[in-house]
Amino acid sequence: YGKMMEQLDNEDRERRQSDKACVLCGFEKLLFEPPVFFCNGMNCASKRIRRNSHFYIGGNNQYFWCNPCYNELDGNIPIELVDLTVKKADLKKKKNDEQHEESWVECDVCNRWIHQ
């Protein structure tokens, strides 16, 4: 156990000394949890849209449709939502695979970069 802890401490120390790594946490890149989208279609009952699947987005990026619900929409009938009305043709296709990296800020004292 002691040997393993010593090895982990050495690795952590080496990581923190890198110019590309954050001084506080030692990592070069931190990813936020991916966003979770829920389908606004009538057939899904607000089911979660799976990661790495295609979906459609509309209405100021506030409303989402999974692929099966999008296919069920009639292109001639506008979609009536609580605060707006959109057409099927106005919905944009996206893939649920986005990953957002935490931004960096520069320290005013030592001029090194740290995660925000």
Image (cartoon, helix red, strand yellow):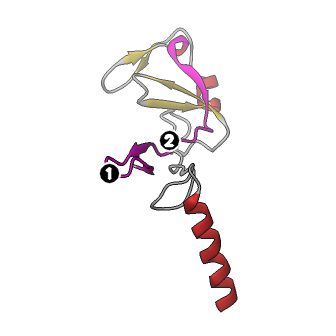
Q: Which residue is mark 1?
A: 109
Residue at 44% x, 30% y is 63
Say the numbered circle drawn on residue 38: 2
Residue 100 drawn in magenta: yes
Crowding at mark 1 (Cα within 10 Å: few <14, some 14-19, many 20+): few
Q: Amino acid at mark 1?
A: Val
Out of 108 and 27, give the one closest to the viewer: 108
Of mark 2 and mark 1, the one earlier in the sequence is 2
- How far is mark 2 from mark 1, CA to CA? 44 Å
Residue 87 placement (x, y as % from top left)? 48, 13
Say the numbered circle drawn on residue 24: none
Q: Quadrant of residue 47?
A: top right
Residue 32 placement (x, y as % from top left)? 50, 49
Q: Is residue 6 left or right of residue 112?
A: right
Kind of element beneath mark 1: loop
- 4 lies above or below 73: below
Q: How many marks overall?
A: 2
Give the magenta part as a residue range. 89-115
Residue at 43% x, 15% y is 86
